[in-house]
Image: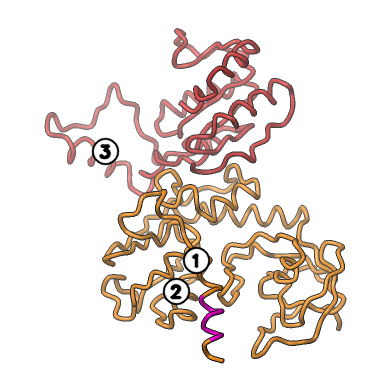
């Protein structure tokens, strides 16, 4: 949402980039030879781990956007508990019907949710919950211009 | 030896002796019972601090104010190191910046500072430090310890997940309120702030409920119950005024 808070400036970015993959792009497979990938969220499940490794291998510059990607933040709050206890809480204690641990559709949880850079190398960090739209815009413009982004306008948390 | 750093604490009436030294190549002077941090601040040189607070005895707990002193390879916490004649101090170098960043990173990794769900989000001194020092991510792994939250007091909460062990609460309670409800137990990474003899805050017999500890706490470790993020801004500036008014009364 903070990304969309760039408002009309998003057109300025759009004119200079080609969006090849996003949750909104109708493409199932992550394409090869991507210049920049912006990733959000912590690495929580085996599927996340598989995805981020593939993204990294096909991307030149990886940006971790937001506290979940940078610190593991709220998804990482389960890390003080064991995975079994987390699953028990979600699928038994808080479930009224069909108490069972899902095995097919839901990817298996990793022992801990980890920030992206603990799993694969990250080139640019944009902390913040969320990072201000101005910082996101400024960072994208400086990357397009080939300069180092100024990150002094954002921090962990608000 | 002149210019040699000493950690002798100031006692009694302010000294009238003046020492001359250089801080970041600037010639400055300060009373002999003043710290390098005092001297720097009086001359507009900013050194980052966390445990230090105007009105409380400096303890050198956080080590963020470390400076280089020419002639010694070790670093000195400027809040507890007194000025010396001819001393040459460097407050900002690549080495110091690296150490300061690492200190902030270690503070974040040691507890669960989940800023997004903290009542101090937006007015937290640890958050501010990370921003000013350019800590955009941690190069050390998060430990995610399982820590308790003591909400037994009727008005306040002690969340160990947010504590940085700056000991401001310990000092303000002992030095200013005179109750000494707060103290530390354990060592190293197992150190915790405790109330009375490690009993729930709500059952403390010495706590007067004054709330000074809450307002000097730099993070969301000590907060008031029922306050929203916007309402829970800490008011730590009462302290110098309070001590000043008390001094006037005793004369």
Which quarter of the picture shows residue A126?
Answer: top right
Q: Mark 2 — residue? A: B184
- Left or right of A148 on screen, residue B104: left
Judge the density around disc 3: few (<14), some (14-19), many (≥20) Cα neighbours within 10 Å.
Answer: some
**Chain of the residue under label 1:** B
Q: Which of B2 and A58 is in front in this view?
A: B2
User: With respect to residue B195, does B218 lie above or below?
Assistant: above
- Left or right of B13 on screen, residue B246: left
Q: Residue B165 carries which label?
A: 1
Which mark sits nearer the N-terminus, 1 or 2?
A: 1
- Left or right of B179 on screen, residue A92: left
Magenta residues, as a range? B242-248
Residue at image point 74% right, 65% down:
B67
**B208 drawn magenta:** no
Q: Which of B18 and B4 is in front in this view?
A: B18
Is circle 2 on the same chain as circle 3? no
Q: Residue furthest left?
A: A97
Label 2, label 3: how many angstroms apart (C-alpha)?
Answer: 36 Å
Label 1 close to label 2 by CB (< 8 Å): yes
The x and y percentages for residue B248 are 56, 85
Question: Dot 3: what SS?
Answer: helix
Q: Which of A91 and A134 is in front in this view?
A: A134
Question: Dot 1: what SS?
Answer: loop
Chain coloured red in this rendering: A
Q: Nearer the viewer, residue B146 or A74?
A: A74
């Amino acid at each position: 949402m903070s990304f969309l808070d760039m408002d009309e400036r998003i057109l300025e970015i759009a004119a200079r980039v080609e969006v090849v993959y996003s949750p909104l792009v109708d493409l199932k497979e992550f394409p090869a030879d991507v210049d920049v990938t912006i990733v959000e969220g912590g690495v929580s499940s085996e599927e996340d781990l598989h995805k981020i490794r593939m993204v990294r291998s096909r991307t030149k510059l990886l940006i971790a956007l937001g506290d979940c990607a940078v610190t593991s933040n709220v998804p990482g709050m389960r890390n003080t508990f064991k995975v079994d206890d987390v699953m028990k809480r979600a699928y038994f204690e808080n479930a009224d019907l069909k108490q069972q641990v899902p095995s097919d559709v839901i990817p298996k949880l990793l022992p801990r949710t980890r920030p992206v850079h603990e799993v694969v190398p990250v080139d640019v960090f944009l902390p913040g919950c969320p990072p201000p739209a101005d910082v996101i815009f400024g960072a994208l413009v400086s990357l397009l211009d080939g300069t180092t982004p100024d990150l002094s306008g954002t921090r962990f948390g608000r | 030896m002149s210019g040699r750093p000493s950690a002798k604490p100031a006692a009694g009436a302010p000294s009238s002796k003046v020492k001359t030294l250089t801080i970041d190549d600037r010639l400055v002077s300060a009373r002999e019972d003043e710290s390098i941090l005092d001297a720097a601040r009086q001359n507009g040189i900013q050194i980052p601090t966390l445990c230090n607070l105007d009105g409380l005895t400096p303890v050198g707990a956080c080590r963020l104010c470390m400076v280089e002193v020419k002639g010694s390879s070790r670093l000195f916490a400027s809040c507890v190191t007194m000025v010396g004649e001819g001393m040459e101090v460097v407050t900002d170098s690549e080495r110091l910046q690296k150490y300061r960043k690492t200190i902030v990173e270690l503070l974040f990794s040691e507890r669960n500072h989940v800023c997004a769900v903290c009542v101090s989000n937006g007015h937290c001194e640890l958050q501010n430090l990370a921003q000013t020092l350019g800590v955009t991510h941690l190069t050390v792994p998060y430990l995610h310890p399982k820590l308790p939250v003591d909400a037994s007091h009727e008005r306040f909460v002690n969340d160990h997940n947010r504590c940085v062990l700056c000991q401001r609460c310990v000092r303000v309670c002992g030095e200013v309120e005179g109750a000494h409800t707060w103290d530390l137990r354990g060592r190293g990474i197992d150190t915790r702030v405790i109330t009375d003899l490690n009993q729930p805050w709500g059952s403390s017999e010495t706590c007067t409920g004054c709330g000074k500890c809450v307002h000097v706490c730099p993070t969301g470790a000590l907060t008031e119950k029922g306050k929203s993020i916007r309402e829970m801004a800490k008011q730590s500036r009462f302290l110098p005024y309070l001590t000043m008014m008390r001094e006037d009364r005793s004369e």
